[in-house]
Image (spheres, rainbow, N blue to C red):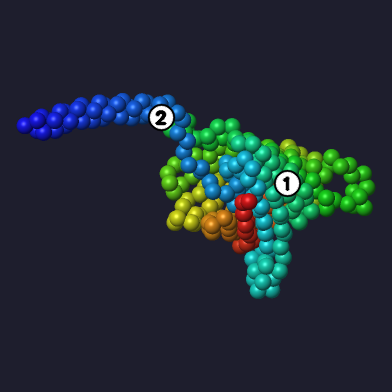
Amino acid sequence: MNTIKTISKILTVGLLFTSVNVMAQDDLLADLEKNSSKRKRFELPAFKSMQIGNLQSTKIASKGDLYLVVSHRFGSIKDGVDGFFGLDQANTKIQFNYGLFNGVQLGVSRDSYQKAYSGNVKFKITRQTRKFPVNIVGYGNIDVNTLLKKETYPNLRFTERLSYTSQLLISKRFSKKMSLLIAPTFVRKNLQNLNLSKEPTFNQLVLGVGGRFKVSKRMSLNIDYAYNFSKAETSVFKNPLTVGVDVETGGHIFQMFFTNSRGSHDAAYLTEAQGDWAKGDVSFGFNVVRVF
């Protein structure tokens, strides 16, 4: 009997302890849920790469990360076999992007188109959360056209080699598969070839739009387009359109696309596309992205 009484006491104490413990855990979980609901919950990034194709995306390098981007733009495919569908010609850009701080990225590049050197800064303004619907990122870039020669332009000043691009990048991840972006853009070009643009338009307003649709775990379809509100009617330049795919391969992102722009630095791509999609005058291109 004593043994039974002892066991009963132990069970009673055990049940009491368990009840108290469960209630304490319930209170703790309630507190955690309450605190968690107060914290901002950020959505996953809208884009995997820093560019949709040609157009900048809202992705920024994390602090301390170094990105190498190698870009190729080949010649027009319209010449067919004679030009090996444009592969006989190529413009190459090599770019480095570095995450200086969380939300701040610096970049430098060199593009063989116009032998242009560029520097840029990209900075996060806000991120998409359950309460705030979009990501907003600021972007600024300066291009230096070193192809211009004093022999051709005797009175050429250094400032006339410069072009500036300012963008407000606004993106939204609508679902696990689809993200969209708009990019109000201002481009300032200090020197223009009037044989091509016909009328001087030093200040140009452009609206970029783009999107990404994920078709598998490692592949997405991408498209971007930019409409130039300031382009003269007599200009030979077209609005740039880029259509392609992203393929993720471990530490690399491989972007393949067709575009009507041969240049890949900002001012050239946004305002100097000469290919005509309606006539099949487009080029194959790709970006290879590697993070260190």
Residue visible at 63% across and 59% down? 285
Measured from the top left, where is residue 246 in percent x and y?
A: 54, 56
Circle on res. 36: 2
Gap in Å between the C-alphas at discs 1 and 2?
A: 40 Å
Measured from the top left, where is residue 48 in percent x and y?
A: 54, 48
In this view, the residue in front, 50 or 161, is 50
Position of residue 60 in the picture relative to residue 172 (left or right): right
Residue 171 seen? yes
Give the mark, 1 or 2, whose residue is nearer the N terminus: 2
Q: Quadrant of residue 189?
A: top right
Q: Are marks 1 and 2 in contact (CB under 8 Å)?
A: no
Q: Which residue is mark 1?
A: 108
In this view, the residue in front, 108 or 99, is 99
Residue furthest out toward the left: 1
Q: Residues within 10 Å of mark 1 (few under 14, many from 20)?
A: some
Position of residue 213 in the picture relative to residue 139 (left or right): left
In this view, the residue in front, 53 or 96, is 96
Position of residue 190 in the picture relative to residue 18 (left or right): right
In this view, the residue in front, 216 or 38, is 38
Residue visible at 53% across and 34% down? 127
Residue visible at 53% across and 39% down? 171
Residue furthest out toward the bottom: 81
